[in-house]
Amino acid sequence: MPQVKRLAPFFFNGLFGGIIAFGLALIVLTGLLSHTFYAGSVAQKTTTLVVAKGQGLSSVATQLKDNNLVSSRHIFALAAVVVGAQGDLRAGEYTIAQGASMAQILGKLRDGDTVARRLVIPEGLTVKQIIARLNDVKGLTGEVYDMPTEGSLLPETYHFSLGDSRQGIVDRMRQSMTDTLAALWPERQAGLPINTPQEALILASIVERETSVDRELSHIAGVFVHRLNRKMKLQSDPTIIYGLTGGEPLGRGLRRSEIRKKTPYNTYHIKGLPPTPICNPGLKTIAAVLDPLKTNDLFFVADGNGGHAFAETYAQHKKNVKAWRNRKR
């Protein structure tokens, strides 16, 4: 019994000391892990990381380590589990700074802060030409299976992420055109000789192909509106080309035989508007058609300086045409 009394304080003191030592070690270890997880640097170099759909935490952690983005794949994976993020890592393309901390990297992957790629669609392209561009864009997937109608896509800059579908981009372009027409049509100028948003789109597509100078859009739209009000034929060369090639450039001037050739789009022969748009017009052109310049001009021709010369009478127009031909010589 006396021996037990002497051993008991030693036993309990030893146990208590061990607990204290373990606790201190745990605190130190936690501090080290925390420092490693949150520590970063000011390095400016970046690395592109692609996380595939269905890729697991262990694989992502290994990929980060292989790219020298984290010092330990085990600490990164453990920290992700501790904060409950192991199932939240989102697929996509990421740009990660070499000096980013594990916490910053994990935050990016959880938030889906992926690289935003840019796709610029110029005004005046046909649907066929736009689809051809989409097919050449790296990073998009799939084919366009729901082919849009001519003029139904709004040209502008679209952002997308790696792996987005081409059909998805087309759907966004189509919705943008629908939204644009819905917003602009109610604000149109009174007395226009166009009765529907589709007719506005057709006329805008012709104006789009007639000039690339923004300041002329409203003026050219005004000329065509004036001709329509006067029951005159539009006589637009781009409509002839669309009837011949579907909008592909001829690479030369029009021949007289082509001007005389009757197609549903040749506005030298048909009255009013052609049956469909001849391209996909931009926002500025649609707005110009719905609020055109009020003008008495009925004619225009290239002026040789990138713009056009306008005229109220055919006599003045012939002088402008002669001046343009002289400049070409």
Image: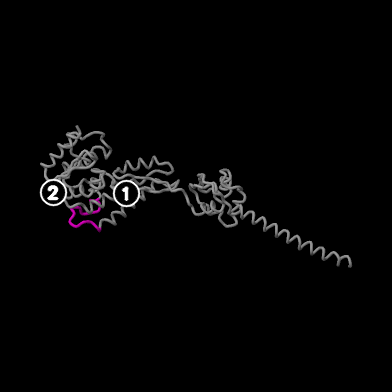
Q: Is residue 9 above or below residue 109?
A: below
The secondary element bearing badge 1 is classed as loop
Q: Residue at x 25, y 53 (%)?
A: 197
User: Which residue does the numbered mark 2 point to in the structure image?
Assistant: 231
Quarter of the image where the N terminus is located? bottom right
Pick whichever of labels 1 and 2 is earlier in the sequence: 1
Q: Residues within 10 Å of mark 1 (few under 14, many from 20)?
A: many
Q: Residue at x 67, y 55 (%)?
A: 29
Tell me, yes or no, whether the highlighted magenta stretch contains residue 170: no
Dot 1 and dot 2 residues touching (CB under 8 Å): no
Q: Residues within 10 Å of mark 2 (few under 14, many from 20)?
A: few
Relative horizontal placement of residue 311, taking residue 101 as reference (left or right): left
- Whole-percent x and y of residue 302? 20, 40
Relative horizontal placement of residue 82, taking residue 159 as reference (left or right): right
**For the residue marked with disc 2, what is the amino acid?**
Lys
Quarter of the image where the C terminus is located? top left
Determine the CA span between mark 1 and mark 2. Answer: 30 Å
User: Which residue does the numbered mark 1 point to in the structure image?
Assistant: 154
**For the residue marked with disc 1, what is the amino acid?**
Leu
Q: Residue at x 25, y 35 (%)?
A: 250
Looking at the picture, tell me which residue is in the foreground, 317 or 118. 317
Q: Main secondary structure of the magenta part?
A: loop
- Whole-percent x and y of residue 23? 70, 60
Looking at the picture, tell me which residue is in the foreground, 127 or 71. 71
Tell me, yes or no, whether the highlighted magenta stretch contains residue 199: yes
- Whole-percent x and y of residue 120? 36, 45
Would you identify the image quadrant in which residue 103 lies? bottom right
Q: Residue at x 20, y 54 (%)?
A: 195
Span highlighted in magenta in the image: 186-200
The secondary element bearing badge 2 is classed as loop
